[in-house]
Amino acid sequence: MAFERESYGFVHADNSRLKEVYGGPTGQVFVECMRLKPDTPSKSVILFSHPIGGGAFLPLVNALARAGRHVIYCNPRYRGNDTALIMEKCAMDLGACVTDLKQRFGYEKVILGGWSGGGSLSLFYQDQAENPSITHTPAGDEVNLKGAGHIAADAVLLLAAHISRGVTMTEWLDPSILDETRPFERDVELNIYDPKCPAQPPYTDEFVARFRAAQIARNRRITEWAKTSLAELKAKGDPDAERCFVVQGTMCDVRWLDPAQDPSDRPAGTCYLGDPRIANDGPVGLGRFTTLRSWLSQWSYDASNANGLKNAAGISVPLLALNNTADLACTPSHAQRLFDATGSKDKTLVQIQGADHYYTSRRDLLPTAVSTLSSWLDERGFN
């Protein structure tokens, strides 16, 4: 089915003192969107978003439009750059988009399309729309989600989604880095990319437990340092001062080298960024460049408010979790854990056998995913 691709944008108010993005006057934020409109009318729309946006041309997004589904892709203010990203402000942008699309296009039903990192953002937004509580970021900066009056969505789709940026970052952190000031001096006993590491795949349960504990410990060390650094800056009399820093070693996971860990159809020895040994310290690794506030909001294991497991427990609308069994980014345990944590009585978990994260290796499986989604939506009257 043919569809029209329509780019548009809108401005909404944001009175935050701190500005983390280029351009625009203080007190206003510009949000860029794209609408994929099939020839057939619909009262329902699937609203995709992601903390750093950029997914309007994803295979699944386009396939849904070709199948007759109205789709909007919302790019939050941090489009393409998560260096200083604040998750609470992503939720503010998404909430403003829900209000705008209802007023602009007259859609009656909104389904959140949570693809990949958009899954935890969708759950975070929906939880705060149903149970608003947040008035400040983890850094203590005011951001009033509690009083924003955001409109709750009518359903949530988790599509090849991971639990959250903070949890995923932690599961990929290189635990062999014991001192952030000397990131290339690594503990050989935990450095799975070092041929001299005594632990080799298949890994024992004891080694995996030690590895995971060391990953969480490293995340907590960085979090504590970020909190202390912010407190020191504020104590000097400049509450808006910020510091940027680099995090090395963010693509290190026993799952990449040992297929028995979180087993699936994915090939061993690779990740969604290619060779994990290279990506571990490469420029496009998760959280490579960040700030004190951004670390606490999006990457911290304990401090981040955007945690899919916690947020999923607070939602009541229908939820569909779709897991791609050959996914090189979001492994099966993520979909299962999110599904188990969801508070909704109407929830469904579906496996798309052999599909990869982007449906690039197996384009032939796109119709299966679209058919699954369409049937689920039709059964609940989203047409």
Image (cartoon, rainbow, N blue to C red):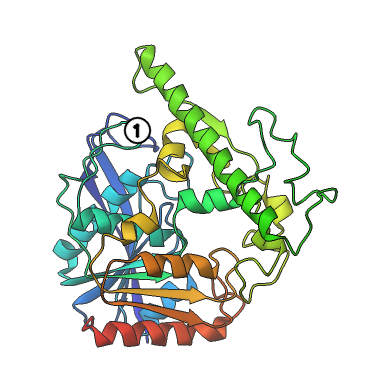
Give the residue at the far right of this rendering: 196
Query: At x 31% / y 31%, what residue is drawn?
Result: 140
Nearer to the camera, 333 or 162: 333
- Image position, residue 228 (x, y; %): 45, 23
Left or right, residue 369 beside residue 35: right
Quadrant of the rendering where the C terminus is positioned: bottom left
Q: Amino acid at mark 1?
A: Lys
Q: Is residue 57 at all visible to an observer of this figure?
A: no
Up the image or down, 84 lies above or below 373; here it is above
Q: Is residue 241 at all visible to an observer of this figure?
A: yes
Q: Rate crowding at label 1 as few (under 14), some (14 to 19) or many (20 or more) other CA atoms within 10 Å.
A: some
Left or right, residue 271 beside residue 77: right
Q: Which quadrant holds residue 100?
A: bottom left
Left or right, residue 225 beside residue 349: right
Up the image or down, 337 lies above or below 284; here it is below
Quadrant of the rendering where the N terminus is positioned: bottom left
Nearer to the camera, 319 or 336: 336
Query: At x 41% / y 52%, what residue is drawn?
Result: 51
Q: Which residue is mark 1?
A: 19
